[in-house]
Image (cartoon, grey):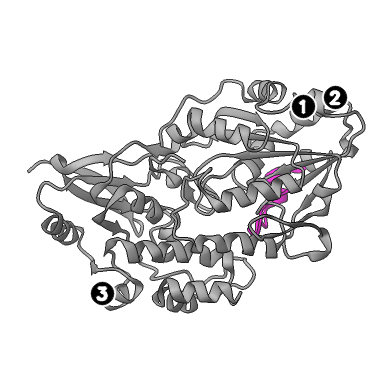
């Protein structure tokens, strides 16, 4: 029988997954579009021809104090040391009557540690404007704006709230809690307080897989309501290829430009059209295959969307480092690998209780919750070296083996010899710090 061969990295060594070619029905991958020959020209065109609001040149008043927000996913490097587009942006604002001293650059990482933010932005930018890194735990730096209709109290960085004009710059790709990056997410979680982030992220306990979902996503709508409360005046979002090069630019109202980007190109880049498969083979990508916990985020939620309810997810990774790294990840309320493993073994009930009681980092545990929920809703096999079958069973897997051939044979026995197989091998073609492939967010197609 002819096989399709998929080379992967297995704890630093090459390995090949072989799957009967006749059974392969879909391959989930990121689709590249040509990079823009002149990204800056495209940015200016987007700012002056925005979606759902007036052009930037008409909205800005000379002498206004401007908060310029950037996230920690590609756009910081785009503005800073990689592409240097911030200097052109500041020159552009100067021509509109905004002096450098009237601009506050707000680094908006949400609760991410981001210790190298100044290094990424670079000294040429930092010498021109006041730059601050948002600290979601610093309550003195926050201003209270009220409560959303979904009962999330909203605290936002004072430098953002007190500005005369707020321009956010971000990137659009699938995200678990918010469905997608981009849009109003630059405010919540970007420059929101820790209590605001926790309350919003607790929304994962709804019986809904939110990955790639926008209008039908209560957490996304909550984020956008908070962004309205913070008066985010305009949002600029870019789309990228698998090498993090800009392929499209959108600007305007925080919701209108975001949805236009989804409809026109973002889904085409990140999503693969396919029918739910009988078997979904998942390899999480180099850099995420050494620990089981880090292999879950978004990939297994995508697998749930890409497999039938009575189908099988087959995860293949070395897990040579076991469940999780023993190194702290920089987040507050960090828990040890043993603690997260025990919570995960307790299932969604234990995770929901710990989050509801605020005994844990809700942002982190929200991802553990959705991964465990997939294991409770879909039969999942694990192929790895670092987790034994007893632990795998307690973690929620139905079967565990170090041999991919054995797991695939059992899945085909369960689903039938003609079972339709979807293959999701996260490409390692190009990585960004901290070594994670750009394409790891690819997922099955989803509307909404």
Q: Which residue is mark 1?
A: 56
Residue 418 in view (yes/no): yes
Going from N to C along the chain, the mark reached first, 1 or 3, is 1
Name the spot of residue 39 as percent of width and height, x first: 62, 25
Residue shown at 77% from the left, 57% from the top: 146
How far is the residue under mark 2 from the one under mark 1? 9 Å
Name the spot of residue 32 as percent of width and height, x first: 43, 31
- On whether residue 429 falls in the magenta region, the answer is no
Task: Please state if 398 lies on the left or on the right of 273 as rendered.
Answer: left
Task: Please state if 142 lies on the left or on the right of 172 as rendered.
Answer: right
Q: Which residue is mark 2?
A: 96
Q: Is 347 above or below relative to 165?
A: below
Residue 292 in view (yes/no): no
Q: Which residue is mark 3?
A: 389
Figure quadrant of residue 127: top right
Q: How many marks?
A: 3
How far is the residue under mark 3 from the one under mark 2? 64 Å
CB under 8 Å between discs 2 and 1: yes
Name the spot of residue 440 as percent of width and height, x first: 43, 47
Q: Nearer the viewer, mark 1 or mark 3?
A: 1
Range shown magenta: 107-123
């Amino acid at each position: 029988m002819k096989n399709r061969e998929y080379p992967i990295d297995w704890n630093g060594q090459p390995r090949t997954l072989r799957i009967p070619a006749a059974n392969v029905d879909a391959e989930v991958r990121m689709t590249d579009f040509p990079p823009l020959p002149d990204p800056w020209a495209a940015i200016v065109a987007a700012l002056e021809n925005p979606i759902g609001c007036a052009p930037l040149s008409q909205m800005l008043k000379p002498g206004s104090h401007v908060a310029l927000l950037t996230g920690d996913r590609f756009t910081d490097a785009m503005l800073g040391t990689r592409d240097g587009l911030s200097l052109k942006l500041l020159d552009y604002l100067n021509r509109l009557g905004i002096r450098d001293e009237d601009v506050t650059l707000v680094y908006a990482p949400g609760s991410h540690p981001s210790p190298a933010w100044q290094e990424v932005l670079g000294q040429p930018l930092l010498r021109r404007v006041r730059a601050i890194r948002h600290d979601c735990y610093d309550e003195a730096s926050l201003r209270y704006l009220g409560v959303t209709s979904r009962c999330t109290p909203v605290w936002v960085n004072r430098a953002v709230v007190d500005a005369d004009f707020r321009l956010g710059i971000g990137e659009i790709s699938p995200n678990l809690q918010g469905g997608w990056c981009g849009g109003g997410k630059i405010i919540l979680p970007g420059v929101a307080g820790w209590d605001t982030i926790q309350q919003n992220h607790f929304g994962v306990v709804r019986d809904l897989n939110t990955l790639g979902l926008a209008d039908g996503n209560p957490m996304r709508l909550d984020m956008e309501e908070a962004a309205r409360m913070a008066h985010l005046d305009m949002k600029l979002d870019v789309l990228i290829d698998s090498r993090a090069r800009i392929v499209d630019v959108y600007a305007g109202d925080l919701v209108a430009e975001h949805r236009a980007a989804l409809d026109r190109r973002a889904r085409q880049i990140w999503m693969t059209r396919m029918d739910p498969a009988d078997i979904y083979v998942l390899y999480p990508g180099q850099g995420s295959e050494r620990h089981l916990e880090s292999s879950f985020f978004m990939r297994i939620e995508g697998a749930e969307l890409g497999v039938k309810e009575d189908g099988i997810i087959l995860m293949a990774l070395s897990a040579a480092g076991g469940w999780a790294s023993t190194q702290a990840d920089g987040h507050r309320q960090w828990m040890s690998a043993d603690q997260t493993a025990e919570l995960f073994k307790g299932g969604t009930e234990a995770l929901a209780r710990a989050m509801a009681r605020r005994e844990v980092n809700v942002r982190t545990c929200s991802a553990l919750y959705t991964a465990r929920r997939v294991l409770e809703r879909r039969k999942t096999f694990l192929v790895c070296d670092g987790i034994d079958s007893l632990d795998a069973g307690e973690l929620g897997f139905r079967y565990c083996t170090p041999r991919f051939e054995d797991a695939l044979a059992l899945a085909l026995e369960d689903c039938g010899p003609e079972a339709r197989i979807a293959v999701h091998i996260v490409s390692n073609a190009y990585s960004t710090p901290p070594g994670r492939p750009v394409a790891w967010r690819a997922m099955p197609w989803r509307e909404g």
